[in-house]
């Protein structure tokens, strides 16, 4: 068993970056995730593992630092919250286009604009539909506990390098600020420079003797070549959709109604299940763990089983609900409930919505 | 006709100039008379002479030299507009033993990328920034740049740059020289043989500083022409540059070995 | 067993650290725990509150609207949280500064003179430990020795010399809590 600690989600994410053998973190402070860089700075990762931690001049600089260092084959990560993540969208598009592996954590807060600093899930569209310009996707993982804030870091790095693609860990102020028991995984070795050179022949870390130099770019002025590159990216995305979907189901076996919720909303929905079942309402939960690729097959399975309706529970005005509707295609009822602006819905409110929107309606 | 064939002339013993292997054989995409090609070549010659072909990572900008990576035969990354200093910072931080440089134009470095430029300089990143200043946005068709001279006509200042309304040209090189993080700051040109020799010497010094681990960033501005953007012949553009650009952007070292040079 | 607690008072009263020690105590006896604070500008000297859940099972929602126990340390928190205690639940409060005392009949109400006792011990900073002692006396969900282990885990090493004083404060709280209804 690994070391047990009581940690904030943000701290667990930071500790996991060190333990996962990350080579560098570049970031800029923003509430509610500043603990990530604060924790990293206080832990002196340069001494612990040789990991570089640098406070950048902006989120724009941070994401482009990921482009640079990630492009040399190093394991790199940043974190921010909604307004900062918006600033990173240009960089993410370039990173996706140039196929550079990296991990970006978004501890979502209320929006739009400066919004507030309380938990929200209103960056769903931005995360799963691309966010920046061009046809691209991020792999998006949604932890719903402090344990997963830790565990999803090495998983994200693995996926990022497996597919040479940016991976986003999307949580919110609740998961970031909450402390829970976390079992920390053991320290993993950082790759040596030689191992990086050996393992990632695409990386620009100095032209190998007797070989062609490498170029990392998202530019191709020849439309036919750029079209081909887009097809290549799409083929990669299809493979990810085929192989990397993660979800969890709770109490769905006998359920008549199913809530679909991720991250902190999934935690609240679990309490709603308890309250509902005390009243004899048979409700279950599908928790998407990867928001992209989306667990379409899991939802389809319950459509086939003749579920009476789905309730998308999310702290947004109704974003993920569209992805559920794309699967359901009108075959059963799909409704949305969520509080926004940093208001966290209570388990009782969710139960009430379930009754009004699905059961009573 | 003397009867000499090409084979009679092209012999190793007759070699007076050879293109460095660190320039690819790709035809340059720059306009005839543009300084970019010469600046590219000088950087690559310096890298070759310093024996750093296999340890160099270059960062290309957005602008005319967006395709610099097509011509410079070393590992290259193409950065988003203005972000090259951030990209290079990170590369150098995770590979401190490598040689890292950015190649940027005036729009890239002194407008959209001002923050990245100043902060990389101020942190004293041990990289080289090569800054090509031609006073105009060349790639997009001759719009006003942060470095466009007062009164200078561009497509977005068609009646001449009116500083009251459009602001003053930015001497960013003098600005970064004031920062404690810069170690070597110089302004050069590449329009004459003498200027080319001086510019190469400056570039070599800049890269040598990095290799020697000198404390700070080396910043080399090259004032260049943009005959297409300025709507002049290459020869006229060089004359105009000497008469108008050089008085405003004075050539020479601004900071050496971490010390500002006193102007006499 | 699942115990859902709200601890609420002023910033600076040690509300968050009290919750943290309680959560760590739960970990020491192999339980699941969560600690969810209110955060943001209101933390700067205003009111502070934290929801702590200690359970034998996987914890669902870390934020709640109803609690098994409310530990209330100022009037604003009394106004806000008295109503949120589940029927049959517990309200523990320090009467110091309270002008409107709790009135509910369907819950058990306890009082601890935390501020006074801490002052009598010569260290107002241990106020929160006196209150914690009162709580674990009323609701012994965590054992005293696990609380002390939790203290050790949550305090930086340089403060370990303060553990005996903290232990004394907890004991003081355990001995001086009174049920008032």
Image (cartoon, coloured by chain):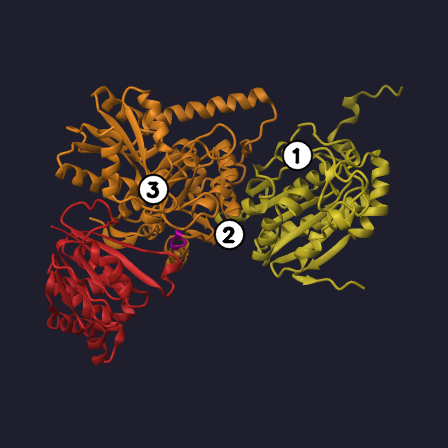
Residue on which the image places disc 2 = A56
Instruction: Give the alpha-carbon distance from disc 1 to disc 3, as whole Å.
Output: 59 Å
Q: Is residue C169 above or below residue A139?
A: below
Residue on which the image places disc 3 = A339
Residue on which the image places disc 1 = B23
The residue stretch that appears in magenta: A32-36
Point out residue A358 in the picture as x, y percentages from the top left corner.
Answer: 25, 29
In this rendered view, identify the residue nearer to me: C160 or C8: C8
Instruction: Give the alpha-carbon distance from disc 2 to disc 1, as whole Å.
Output: 33 Å
Q: Is residue B116 visible?
A: yes
Q: Is residue C105 above or below residue B196?
A: below
Q: How many marks?
A: 3
Q: Is residue A177 left or right of residue C23?
A: right
In which quadrant of the rendered view does residue C130 lie? Answer: bottom left
Q: Is residue C154 visible?
A: no
* Chain letter matching colour yellow: B
* Quarter of the figure with the C terminus of chain A: top left
């Amino acid at each position: 068993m690994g070391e047990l600690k009581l940690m904030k989600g943000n701290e667990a994410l930071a500790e996991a970056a060190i333990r996962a053998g990350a080579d560098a973190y570049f970031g800029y402070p923003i509430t509610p995730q500043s603990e990530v860089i604060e924790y990293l700075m206080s832990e002196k990762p340069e001494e612990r593992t040789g990991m570089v931690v640098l406070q950048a001049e902006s989120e724009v600089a941070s994401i482009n630092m990921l482009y640079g260092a990630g492009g040399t084959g190093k394991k790199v990560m940043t974190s921010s919250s909604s307004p900062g993540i918006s600033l990173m969208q240009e960089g993410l598009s370039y990173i996706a286009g140039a196929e550079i592996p990296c991990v970006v954590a978004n501890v979502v807060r209320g929006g739009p604009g400066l919004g507030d600093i309380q938990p929200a899930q209103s960056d769903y569209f931005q995360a799963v539909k691309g966010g920046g310009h061009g046809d691209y996707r991020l792999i998006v993982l949604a932890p719903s506990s402090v344990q997963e804030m830790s565990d999803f870091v090495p998983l994200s790095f693995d996926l990022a390098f497996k597919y040479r693609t940016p991976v986003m860990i999307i949580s919110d102020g609740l998961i970031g600020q909450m402390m829970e028991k976390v079992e920390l995984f053991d320290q993993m070795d950082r790759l040596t420079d030689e191992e990086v050179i050996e393992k990632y022949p695409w990386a620009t870390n100095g032209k190998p003797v007797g070989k062609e130099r490498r170029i990392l770019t998202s530019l191709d002025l020849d439309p036919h070549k750029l079209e081909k590159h887009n097809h290549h990216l799409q083929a990669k995305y299809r493979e990810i959709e085929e192989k990397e979907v993660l979800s969890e189901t709770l109490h769905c076996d006998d359920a008549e109604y199913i809530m679909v919720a991720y991250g902190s909303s999934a935690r609240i929905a679990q309490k709603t299940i308890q309250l509902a079942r005390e009243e004899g309402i048979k409700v279950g939960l599908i928790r998407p763990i990867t928001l992209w690729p989306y667990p379409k097959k899991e939802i389809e399975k319950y459509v086939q089983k003749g579920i009476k309706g789905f309730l998308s529970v999310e702290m947004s005005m109704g974003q993920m609900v569209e992805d559920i509707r794309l699967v359901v295609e009108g075959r059963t009822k799909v409704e949305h409930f969520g509080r926004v602006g940093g208001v966290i819905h209570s388990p009782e409110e969710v139960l009430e919505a379930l009754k009004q929107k699905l059961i009573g309606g | 006709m003397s009867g000499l064939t090409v084979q009679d002339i092209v012999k190793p013993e007759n070699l007076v100039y050879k293109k460095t292997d660190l320039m690819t054989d790709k035809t340059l995409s720059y306009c005839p008379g543009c300084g970019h090609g010469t600046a590219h070549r000088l950087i690559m010659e310096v890298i070759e002479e310093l024996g750093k072909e296999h340890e160099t990572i270059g960062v290309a900008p957005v602008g005319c030299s967006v395709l610099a990576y097509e011509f410079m035969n070393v590992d290259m990354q193409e950065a988003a507009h203005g972000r090259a200093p951030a990209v290079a910072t990170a590369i150098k931080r995770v590979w401190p033993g490598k040689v890292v440089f950015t190649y940027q134009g005036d729009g890239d470095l002194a407008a959209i990328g001002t923050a990245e430029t100043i902060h990389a300089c101020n942190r004293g990143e041990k990289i080289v920034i090569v800054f090509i200043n031609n006073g105009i946005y060349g790639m997009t068709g001759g719009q006003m740049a942060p470095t466009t001279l007062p009164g200078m006509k561009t497509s977005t200042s068609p009646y001449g740059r009116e500083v009251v309304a459009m602001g003053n040209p930015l001497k960013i090189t003098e600005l970064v020289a004031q920062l404690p993080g810069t170690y070597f700051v110089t302004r050069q040109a590449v329009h004459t043989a003498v200027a080319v020799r001086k510019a190469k010497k400056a570039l070599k010094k800049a890269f040598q500083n990095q290799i020697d681990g000198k404390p700070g960033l080396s910043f080399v501005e090259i004032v260049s022409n943009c005959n297409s953007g300025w709507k002049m012949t290459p020869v006229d553009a060089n004359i105009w540059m000497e008469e108008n650009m050089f008085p405003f952007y004075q050539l020479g070292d601004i900071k050496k070995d971490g010390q500002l040079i006193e102007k006499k | 067993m699942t115990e859902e607690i709200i601890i609420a008072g002023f910033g600076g009263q040690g509300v968050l650290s009290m919750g943290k020690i309680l959560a760590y105590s739960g970990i020491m006896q192999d339980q699941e725990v969560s600690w969810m604070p209110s955060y943001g500008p209101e933390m700067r000297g205003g009111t502070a509150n934290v929801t702590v859940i200690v359970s034998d099972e996987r914890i669902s929602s870390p934020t709640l609207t109803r609690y098994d126990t409310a530990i209330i340390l100022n009037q604003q928190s009394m106004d806000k949280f008295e109503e949120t205690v589940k029927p049959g639940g517990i309200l523990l409060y320090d009467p110091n500064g309270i002008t409107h005392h709790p009135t509910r009949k369907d819950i058990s109400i306890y009082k601890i003179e935390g501020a006074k006792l801490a002052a009598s011990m010569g260290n107002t900073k241990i106020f929160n430990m006196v209150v914690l002692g009162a709580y674990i006396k009323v609701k012994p969900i965590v054992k005293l020795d696990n609380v002390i282990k939790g203290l050790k885990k949550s305090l930086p090493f340089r403060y370990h010399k303060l553990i005996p004083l903290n232990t004394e404060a907890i004991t003081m709280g355990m001995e001086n809590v009174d049920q008032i209804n």
